Image: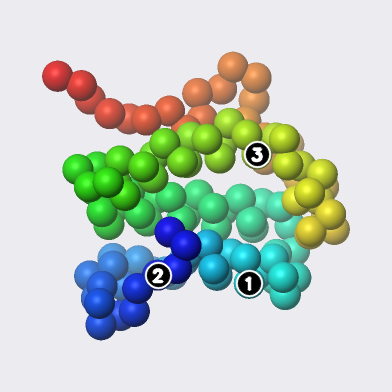
Amino acid sequence: MRQLAGKRKLPEYYEKSQEPIDLTIIEEKIQTGNYKTPDQFDNDMIKLFDYYIKYYSRTSEIGISAPRLRKLYLCNKINFINTITEATGKVPTNSFPPSQGSTAGDEDVIRL
């Protein structure tokens, strides 16, 4: 998740992903002030996890970790509202933090 492999190494990933993203891209967007709202940052984080789940499937180590990391992010992003507000210069919308008792990020795993 830190940095994407090149198109030659993972051509299938680039075919499945409309806008490939990794943590390096997200970090660069933060540093350059590319995120104008907290929701843009949030959307990229969700996209990151969702792409890794979609590409690697839930049978690989990365595919197993991605939903867990997504859940951790969703459950803890409320703790970083001040940092995100400072980075973007805007206050997050009401939809940014999950509501109390929300099951945001719960894994949709069917166990047999």
Q: For the residue marked with disc 3, what is the amino acid?
A: Lys
Tell me if I can see residue 34 in this picture.
yes
Q: Which mark is drawn over residue 28? A: 1
Q: Earlier in the sequence, mark 3 or mark 2?
A: 2
Q: Which mark is drawn over residue 77? A: 3
* Relative to 88, residue 62 above or below: above
Q: Identify the residue at image location x=22%, y=47%.
A: 60
Rendered location of residue 65, percent (x, y): 36, 42
User: Circle 2 sits on which residue?
Assistant: 4
Q: Secondary structure at mark 2?
A: loop
- Determine the residue located farthest toward the bottom in the rendered image: 8
Tell me if I can see residue 15 in this picture.
no
Q: Nearer the viewer, mark 3 or mark 2?
A: 2
Position of 94 with respect to 102 (left or right) is right
Q: Identify the residue at image location x=75%, y=64%.
A: 36
Q: Identify the residue at image location x=43%, y=59%.
A: 1
**Rendering quarter of residue 15:** bottom left
Q: For the residue marked with disc 1, what is the amino acid?
A: Glu
